[in-house]
Amino acid sequence: MSLAPAALLCLALAAPASVKVDRYHLQSNAWVNLHQRLMYSARFEPSPPKGLTEEAAAEWESAVAAYRDFLGKRSPIFDGELIEMNAALSATHGSRLPDSVPAAARLALVKAMPLYARQQWAEDDSTNRFWIALARPMLASAGEELLAAHERAYGVPFPKRILVDVSIFGWEYGAYTVGDPQSVHCVISSTDPGSQGFAALESLMHEPSHGIVEPASGALGADLVAAAAELNRKIPYNLWHGLLFYTAGELTRRALARRGVDYQPLIYRGMFDRQFVGFKEPFESTWRAYLDGTRTRADAIRQIVLATGKPPE
C-alpha cells in the first residue's frame, strides 16, 4: 500500500539525524537540505530531485525560479536575512515552517518539499547520515585534542557551540560558516571531495575557525594587518584564508599521524598552484616552525608578511 503525499511528507520529516559530540552538533535536516538545493539550483546549476514526472518537473522549476528571484545576487554567508532563514530552517523538525521564513521563500519551499520528499530526500539523508557516522568517531577521538591545538595556534578560544548542518549542497565551495567567536553555524556538503573521508575531520576544524578568524580582525587577521602596517607592505587579500587552510590541515595531519593515518591536507591538493600561489614556502618554513613551538607567532607573522607582501604602489 502506497502512502498518501501528506503521510509521506510527515514520515520524511519525522526523524532527523542528530548527533552531539562535545561542543559539536551534527544533523541532517530536510528543510536545510531543500533550501541548499534550491539555492544551488537557482544560482549555479540545475539539480532537480530524481523521479519527477513531467508535470512535477515543471512545478520544481517554478519553485527554483521563485528562489532565483528571492535570492537575487545575495550570498548566504553575508546576507542577514538568509543567515537567519537558514538558522530557522535548521531548528525546524516537522512539516510546519516557522513564521520567520520570508513569504517568497516559504511559498517555494512548501511547493518543492513534496517533490523533494517523494524520493530524493531519502537518498540525500542516507548520504548525510553516512557522513555523520564517519565523522562522529573521528571527532570523539581527536576533536578536543585538535580544538586545543587550534586555540594554542590562534591564541583565542575556539567557538563553544558548533552547529553543523550536513547537506548534499553547501553553496559555491561545498561548505560555509556564519557566526561569531561564541557560536557558529556551518553547512558542510556530504558529497564534496574536500569534506569526505578523513578530510571531514579537517573540514570540521576549518569551518568553525571562521568564527574566530577574520580577514582584518580576530585571530590571524588582526596580526597580519598590524604587521603589514608596521612593515609597510600590502598583503594578498586571501593570505588570512591561506593560513587558516594551512593551520587546520597541518594540525589535522598531525592528529591523524598520531593515529597511524598518512593524511594529505586539502591545501596540498592543488591550492598552492591556484588561489594560494607563493604561499607554500613561507607557510612551510615559518608557520610550521611556529606550530612546532620553535618560533613565536609575532615573528612568524612578520616573516610571512615580508615574504608575501609588496610595498604599496
Image (tube, grey):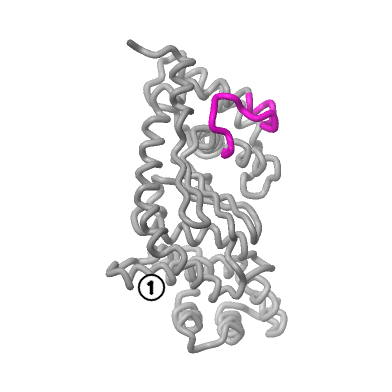
Q: Amino acid at mark 1?
A: Arg
**Mark 1 falls on what kind of element?**
helix
Residue 273 visible, this orientation = no
Which quadrant, please, contains the C terminus? bottom right
- Above/below status of 106 relative to 163: above
* Prevalent SS, magenta region: loop
* Residue 154 position (above or below residue 125): below
**Which residue occupies the foreground of this view, 43 or 214?**
214
On the question of residue 199 being in view, the answer is yes
Residue in the picture at 54% in, 75% down: 153
The image quarter containing residue 109 is top right
Compare residues 162 and 268 and report the one nearer the observer: 162
Residue 205's x, y, as percent?
48, 61
Q: What span is colored magenta in the figure? A: 90-106
Instruction: Work out whether 210 lies above or below 31.
Output: below
Viewer-proximal residue among 56 and 88: 88
At x 32%, y 10%, the residue is 1
Magenta includes 265? no
* Rendered location of residue 200, percent (x, y): 40, 55
Q: Position of residue 306 (x, y in %)?
A: 59, 83
Question: What is the x, y in percent for residue 185?
Answer: 58, 50
Q: Which residue is mark 1?
A: 254
Residue 135 lies left or right of residue 9; in this view the side is: left
Furthest-left residue in this view: 260
Q: Residues within 10 Å of mark 1 (few under 14, many from 20)?
A: some
Indicate whether residue 102 is drawn in magenta: yes
